[in-house]
């Protein structure tokens, strides 16, 4: 245990959960619950991080997901390699299922954070890690801005949506310790229970409405978009109604460069 005047050690915290877990039958939930740690272990192994999974701190099942802590020095490798491998492992598992069994889908949200964590350790009567960093990790996982990423993507293509905390983004991505371009990550403001802050969204394999409208500030949970401006290559349409007799000449001009001459012998006028 940490003394009263000591800061608990900094830990990276990774938590995943499963989309629509409660919508499955009891048998389906049992299948998913058994598959989650196996899928994670394989993804860590393929990412060259088997030792991180093997030595995980405070590993714990959450019913519809799983959580672990680990040494923060592994954060760049987790950000760069683990999530892509986890998307691939989930896709492969999906492809191996018989057509009728695909209603038991394993699609995940993952949340990654770092901060001081009090790990009670063995013999303390508690299996839960304690600290604001742990709570924030779970809050980001539950944010609607994260949940909607799977809702608005193709369930046969996109199997993982990732929430990176502000601290992970600043310490790992912006510093370029993780070679993941910031341009593939979108920041969103989130308000979940007592947490108010920023989440950085990352989808290794975007599809569906995410490709059409993206998942930034312009898209809401239904995929509606408010355009910021008219694209430069778009010509706005105009409809004019002219009434009265057939007298004279009507000329409609969108963009005019140079003079305008109306009919033979007409005078040129500068706009």
Image (tube, rainbow, N blue to C red):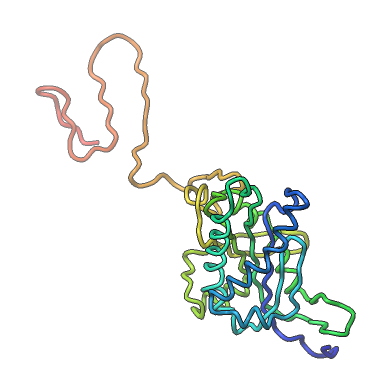
* Left or right: residue 78 compared with residue 10: left
Nearer to me, 171 or 74: 74
Q: Quadrant of residue 172?
A: bottom right
Q: Quadrant of the C terminus?
A: top left
Q: Residue at x 14, y 22 (%)?
A: 263
Count up the numbered dots.
0
Establish if 198 lies above or below 76: above
* Left or right: residue 8 compared with residue 165: right
Q: Residue at x 49, y 68 (%)?
A: 182
Establish if 263 lies above or below 235: above
Which residue is at the far left? Answer: 265
Q: Is residue 216 visible?
A: no
Q: Quadrant of the N terminus?
A: bottom right
Q: Residue at x 30, y 9 (%)?
A: 245
Establish if 42 lies above or below 73: above
Return the x and y of residue 234 as percentages of the image width and height.
Answer: 35, 41
Q: Quadrant of residue 158?
A: bottom right
Return the x and y of residue 44 as percentages of the image width and height.
Answer: 59, 74
Q: Is residue 160 visible?
A: yes
Nearer to me, 29 or 144: 29
Nearer to me, 61 or 28: 28
């Amino acid at each position: 245990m940490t003394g009263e005047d000591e800061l608990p050690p900094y830990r990276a915290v990774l938590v995943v959960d499963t989309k629509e877990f409660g919508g499955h039958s009891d048998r389906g939930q049992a299948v998913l619950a058994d598959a989650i740690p196996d899928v994670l272990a394989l993804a860590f192994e393929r990412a060259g991080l088997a030792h991180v999974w093997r030595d995980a701190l405070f590993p714990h099942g959450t019913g519809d997901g799983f959580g672990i802590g680990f040494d923060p020095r592994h954060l760049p490798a987790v950000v760069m390699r683990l999530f892509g491998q986890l998307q691939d492992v989930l896709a492969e598992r999906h492809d191996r299922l018989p057509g009728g069994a695909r209603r038991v889908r394993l699609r995940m949200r993952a949340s990654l954070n770092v901060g001081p964590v009090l790990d009670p350790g063995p013999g303390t009567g508690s299996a839960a890690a304690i600290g604001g960093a742990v709570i924030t990790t779970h809050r980001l996982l539950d944010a609607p801005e994260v949940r909607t990423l799977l809702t608005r993507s193709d369930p046969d293509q996109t199997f993982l949506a990732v929430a990176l905390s502000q601290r992970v983004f600043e310490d790992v991505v912006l510093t370029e310790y993780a070679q993941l371009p910031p341009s593939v990550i979108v920041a969103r403001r989130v308000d979940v229970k007592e947490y108010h802050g920023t989440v950085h969204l990352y989808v290794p394999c975007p599809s569906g409405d995410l490709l059409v409208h993206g998942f930034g500030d312009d898209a809401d949970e239904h995929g509606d978009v408010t355009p910021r401006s008219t694209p430069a290559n778009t010509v706005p349409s105009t409809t004019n109604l002219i009434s009265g007799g057939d007298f004279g000449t009507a000329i409609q001009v969108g963009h005019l460069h140079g003079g305008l001459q109306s009919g033979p012998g007409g005078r040129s006028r500068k706009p």
